[in-house]
Image (cartoon, rainbow, N blue to C red):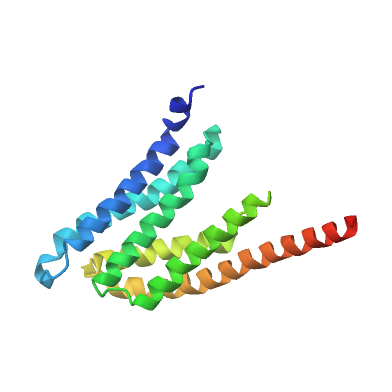
Amino acid sequence: MSGKEKISNIPNILTILRILIAIALVFLLYAQKGLPADRLAPWNWISLILFVIGAVSDYIDGYLARKYGWVTNFGKLFDPLADKFLIAFSLIMLTDLQRVPGWITVILVGRDIAVTGLRGLASEMGVVIAAAWSGKFKTLAELLAVGGYIYWGDLWFLNGEKWGNFFVIFAIILALWSGFEYFARFWKVVTMEEKVEEGKQ
């Protein structure tokens, strides 16, 4: 199978779509800056629909890759990056719109950067740190919170701001907890390897 065929499977196409959606959201959210509240609804709807498509595509491409064995090096690298782009880009722009406090964005985006760097370092050492369930629930809480902040106004019987404020609490708690878990696992592996090396000397 050629490299082109490997990249051109459905999960990878969905990953690329998610990256494009993350970039599109930057422009859609930036376009809302300075607009009066009564003109935000159409922009919020478009942004929310794109965000939901991006979020759902994450679960679909993961399911298809596992079920049909469509796992590629491209997917291994860009699938987790696409997820982080979708959330990080949105949070940064929402902070610029003053919908999300800056300290929340620093915690959530900073945690992802730290964990990504940690897993990359572990990979260089030949160690795979599997994703923890707390991290998966953290991502779900982030998606729900960011979705609320993107819509912002009233959505039927829900208010986007209150929805976002509710789920972002869980996102922060799970971000810190899962981050601690990753660093604890990494430290345990490093400590064990050091003991093995000492035993060989």
- Percent of width and height locating residue 5: 45, 25
Of residues 8 and 55, the one nearer the viewer is 8
Q: Report if residue 129 is visible in the image.
A: no
Of residues 54 and 185, the one nearer the viewer is 185
Residue occupying the point 40% across, 43% down: 15
Residue 156 lies, with reference to residue 73, above or below; the image says below
Residue occupying the point 35% across, 76% down: 102
Of residues 100 and 199, the one nearer the viewer is 199
Q: Report if residue 182 is visible in the image.
A: yes
**Numbered circles on residues, count:** 0
* Left/right of residue 78 with respect to residue 102 in the rendered view: right
Residue 58 lies, with reference to residue 116, above or below; the image says above
Residue occupying the point 52% across, 36% down: 72
For the C terminus, which image quadrant?
A: bottom right
Residue occupying the point 17% across, 59% down: 43
- Percent of width and height locating residue 29: 22, 61
Residue 36 lies, with reference to residue 22, above or below; the image says below
- Percent of width and height locating residue 149: 29, 68
- The single residue placed furthest to the front in the displayed view is 201
- The single residue placed furthest to the top in the displayed view is 1
- Percent of width and height locating residue 198: 86, 61
